[in-house]
Image: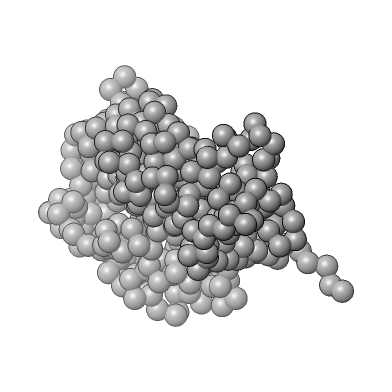
Amino acid sequence: MRRINGRERTVLWFGGALLFLALITIGGRFLAEKAMVTDFSRKNLAPCPAYLFGTDWMGRDMFVRTLTGLSMSIRIGFLAAGVSALLALILGTASAVMGRAVDSVITWIIDLVMGIPHILLLILISYACGKGFKGVVIGVSLTHWTSLARLIRGEVLQLKEAAYIKAAGKLGMSRFKTAWKHMVPHLLPQFLVGLILLFPHAILHEASITFLGFGLSPEQPAIGVILSESMQYLAMGKWWLALFPGLLLAGTAALFDVAGESLRKLLDPGSAHR
Amino acid sequence: MELEAKHISFQYGSDSRQILNDFSLKLTQKERVGLIAPSGFGKTTFCKILAGYEKPDQGEILLDGRPLAEYKGYCPVQMIWQHPEHLVNPRLRMREVLAEGDHLEGRIVEGLGIEPDWLNRYPAELSGGELQRFCIARALGERTRFILADEISTMLDLITQSQIWSFLVQETRQRGIGLLAVSHNLPLLQQVCTRVEDLEQRD
């Protein structure tokens, strides 16, 4: 059998991670009904072949609940990371091209948001927006754009001064075409990788504020809700209620990280040769 | 057309040395002028000002009596730089670099010895000399009236140097493009140019 090279292995990692995450998201969506089913004839079962993650005190299948919760987390992450990355792109570019006054205002806002502990700001915004799905998405979106915005601002500033971009102006290339031809090929990889690397943060933060009670409401099958409920039963020896959902949450976050890092390697030709 | 630099003064930042002091130069489309000076005397700076990349502190650049900055779109004065690797986008293929030129004729690409195979490569896959040929070709677009060549051949071997210079001389003479050639190398300038100016002595 032919040995696969580094680049092919990276493609496989990237594809595998995306496939797995897609399966969780879609699977969880279809299992949503099943996750609500309570059956007291099977309550508090330890993990067994029929119920891989066991069941809880109301006889709900923890495997199905976990998948549904994760699916919800991923969808929230998708929305929040998307909004956040878009915000970063717009503000970062505006900061770099719209002159000094705009730049100092935007960098001041970036410093302000970065200066306040993430989780605190997140709780405040989520609470102010009435918690729930909307509160979490707005909260995560408004707190996670800063570092990507900074990155994009720096990149655009550097590109603006690049000799080949100045030469393009002298060759009569319009500003729009210069941006499209010369800037987008540099910014797009940064943006895509930044977007994917935002996911794990968004998902973990969603789970943490839900766990603390400032996020999704208790009747929703969210990972944060599962974890906070299981706290009461941990002391009674029901270890599986927290262990498996927690592991899967950590695994999902790690997989997004793998996907982002592999994409970075694929899009930056220099690093693929290493 | 006539390109004129009138009483140009320039320094980088207010506390640094005065690089150009009341320097003037006139160049017509029929001429090939050589500009010689040791390092640090502002040869590149002067080219950048003359091509409109920098604004002089005092004085002005006139093209047929009109300030160069008033010419919008394609600039009739094109500069070829010393370091071609900074002048091409590392993420675009060489085909796209040539496409930036203004209606380039195949004759120019051939005359500079650009191989068809190079067009599909990225800048990192070509040598400095090979990249420089692309930059020269790109600057020789249809609407170019003046070429400013800033040490364009320092990184090339002698055979390639003579190949590129003889092409450039023939091309500019044939199309009536004015040429300003900047170099340390006096014999080269005497060979290529119709007259040679010394930036040091005019200072």
Can you say which quadrant of the picture contains the C terminus of chain B? Answer: top left
Can you say which quadrant of the picture contains the N terminus of chain B? Answer: bottom left
Q: Name the residue: 38% across, 75% down.
A: B104
Q: Name the residue: 32% across, 41% down.
A: A131
* Outermost residue to the top: B15
Q: Left of A46 or right of it: where is B98? A: left
Query: Residue B94 location, x and y as percent?
Result: 50, 67
Query: Residue A22 location, x and y as percent?
Result: 55, 64
How many numbered marks are there? 0
Q: Is residue A162 visible?
A: no
Query: Residue A236 location, x and y as percent?
Result: 66, 34
* Front in this rendered view, residue B155 or A123: A123
Q: Quadrant of residue A109?
A: top left
Residue A19 position (above or below residue B128): below
Residue B24 position (above or below residue B109): above
Q: Is residue A221 visible?
A: yes
* Front in this rendered view, residue B177 or B74: B74
Q: Name the residue: 49% across, 58% down.
A: A36
Q: Left of A1 or right of it: where is A144? A: left
Residue A251 position (above or below residue A25): above
Q: Left of A17 or right of it: where is A1? A: right
Q: Left of B20 or right of it: where is B43? A: right
Residue B5 position (above or below residue B104): above
* Front in this rendered view, residue A113 or B91: A113
* Outermost residue to the front: A41
Q: Name the residue: 48% across, 37% down.
A: A211
Q: Quadrant of residue A213?
A: top left
